[in-house]
Image (cartoon, helix red, strand yellow):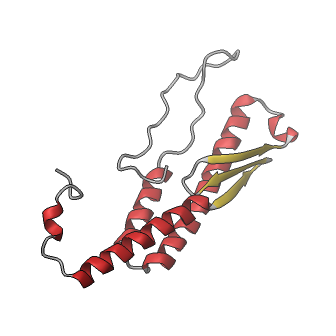
Amino acid sequence: MSGFDDLSRIDGLGQSELDRLAARARTALEWRRTAEQQRAAGEHEGVRATVSGTGALVDLRIATSACADGGDALAARVGEAISRARAEVARHVVRSAEDAFGEDASEVRTVREQWEAGALHRPAVLHNGTDEGDRAPRRPPTPPPSGGGMW
């Protein structure tokens, strides 16, 4: 049974403590909506990626010049632009959590840890074996971090 299923923990709480917990939950829900609406862009060698507050790609702009030296180079540029955008949105999301909960709050530590874990999973170029000269072994995509994080 998870901590959320064990309602016996709230049986002995007074009304003021229940009110404080309810206010904290409302703050968390409002912060989550705000965080998800965040946007940030990252640029790298002619590629501009924009991600949401959850790290999802929402826009991708590629200059023709970024395509000049082949698909693998372009894919690497896209991956780097996405990583830079995610790093920037992570700063925004953590800052918004600090504003909502206080700099030393456990919620801020959780948000920061989730983004740091997500940063370990950078976009990777997956080869499908259809391009001539494609000799790199195929690898499966890296799964997102467990725990429901921001990715």
Viewer-proximal residue among 90 and 24? 24
The quarter of the picture where residue 42 lies is bottom right
Q: Residue at x 17, y 62 (%)?
A: 7
Q: Is residue 11 above or below residue 145?
A: below
**Viewer-proximal residue among 93 and 4:** 4
Most extreme residue toward the bottom, as rendered? 16
Please identify the quarter of the rendering in which residue 126 is found: top right
Viewed as shown, does residue 13 lie left or right of 35? Answer: left
Disc count in the image?
Answer: 0
In the picture, measured across the screen, residue 79 lies left or right of residue 54, that is right
Q: Is residue 137 left or right of residue 15?
A: right
Q: Residue at x 66, y 59 (%)?
A: 40
Question: In x, y percent, where is residue 38?
Answer: 62, 62
Q: Is residue 7 left or right of residue 108?
A: left
Residue 108 in sight:
no
Q: Is residue 139 visible?
A: yes
Rendered view: 138 above or below 2: above
Q: Residue at x 58, y 68 (%)?
A: 92
Query: In terms of depth relative to the viewer, which is nearer, 8 or 39?
Result: 8
Residue 22, image x and y in percent? 34, 73
Find the residue positioned furthest to the front: 15
- What residue appears at the point 44 percent right and 79 percent down from the top-left corner? 103
Seen in the picture, residue 102 relative to 78 is either above or below; the reply is: below
Give the image location of residue 75, x and y in percent: 68, 36
Image position, residue 29 (x, y; %):
45, 65
